[in-house]
Amino acid sequence: MRLIGNVIWLICGGLLTCLGYLWGGLLLCLTIIGIPWGLQVMKIGIAHLAPFGRNVVSTGNSIPVISFVFNLIWIIFAGIWIALVELLFGLLLCITIIGIPFGLQHFKLMRLALYPFGYDLR
C-alpha cells in the first residue's frame, strides 16, 4: 500500500514539489548564513518524495537551545507559510474520500515544515 501511495503521490505533484524545495534549498545554500536553513529545505523536499509509511521523529542528536533558536527563526521567516500551504492542501484533499490519505500526508509534512531542526521523517 505504501508503494502505491508513494507512486500516486509522485505523479500527482510530489516530484515537482520536491524539485521546488531542492531548488529553494540550493539558493539558500549559496549564502553562508542560509546554509542551515537551505539544508532543512532540502530535507523537506526529500521528504516530499515518499511520505507514505514514514513518521516525523526527533533525531535526538541536536543541541536543544540551538534547535529552538533556529526553529524560531525558521517559523518567523518561512515555516509558518509552508505549514499553511500544507494545511490548505491537506484540507482540500480531505474533502473527498479518495484524497483523505494524501491529505493526511500533508498534515504530517506540516509538522516537519514547522520544526525542521531536530526532527526528521523516518
Image (spheres, helix red, strand yellow):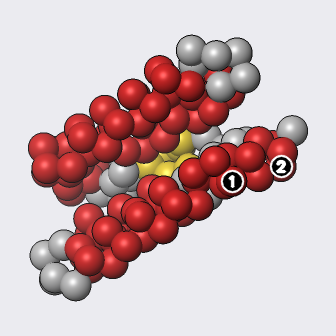
Q: Position of residue 84 (x, y in %)?
A: 31, 32
Q: Amino acid at mark 2?
A: Leu
Q: Is residue 96 left or right of residue 24?
A: right
Please name the residue that numbered disc 1 is placed on. 11
Q: Residue at x 40, y 28 (%)?
A: 87
Q: What residue is shown at x 29% (from left), y 57% (from top)? A: 63
Question: Splitting the image into 4 quarters, where does residue 49 fall?
Answer: bottom right
Identify residue for label 2.
3
Q: Amino acid at mark 1?
A: Ile
Q: Do the residues bearing badges 2 and 1 touch, measured as CB atoms within 8 Å?
A: no
Q: Position of residue 22 (x, y in %)?
A: 42, 70
From where the camera sits, is residue 43 visible? Answer: no
Near-viewer residue (65 or 46): 46
How many numbered dots are placed on residues in this image? 2
Q: CA distance from mark 2 to mark 1?
A: 12 Å
Question: Considering only order in the chain, which callout, 1 or 2, is on the residue closer to the N terminus?
Answer: 2
**Which residue is located at x 31 percent, y 43 percent?**
82
Q: Is residue 65 left or right of residue 102?
A: left
Comparing labels 2 and 1, the label whose residue is closer to the camera = 1
Q: Specify whether 25 is left or right of 80.
A: right
Q: Is residue 96 left or right of residue 18?
A: right
Q: Which mark is residue 21?
A: none
Give above or below for 30 relative to 87.
below
Characterize the local packing of mark 1: few (<14), some (14-19) or many (20 or more) Cα atoms within 10 angstroms. Answer: few
Residue 106 is situated, as x and y percent measured from the top left of the image, at 51, 35
- Residue 11 horizontal/vertical position (percent): 68, 53
Inspect this view and state whether residue 97 appears: yes
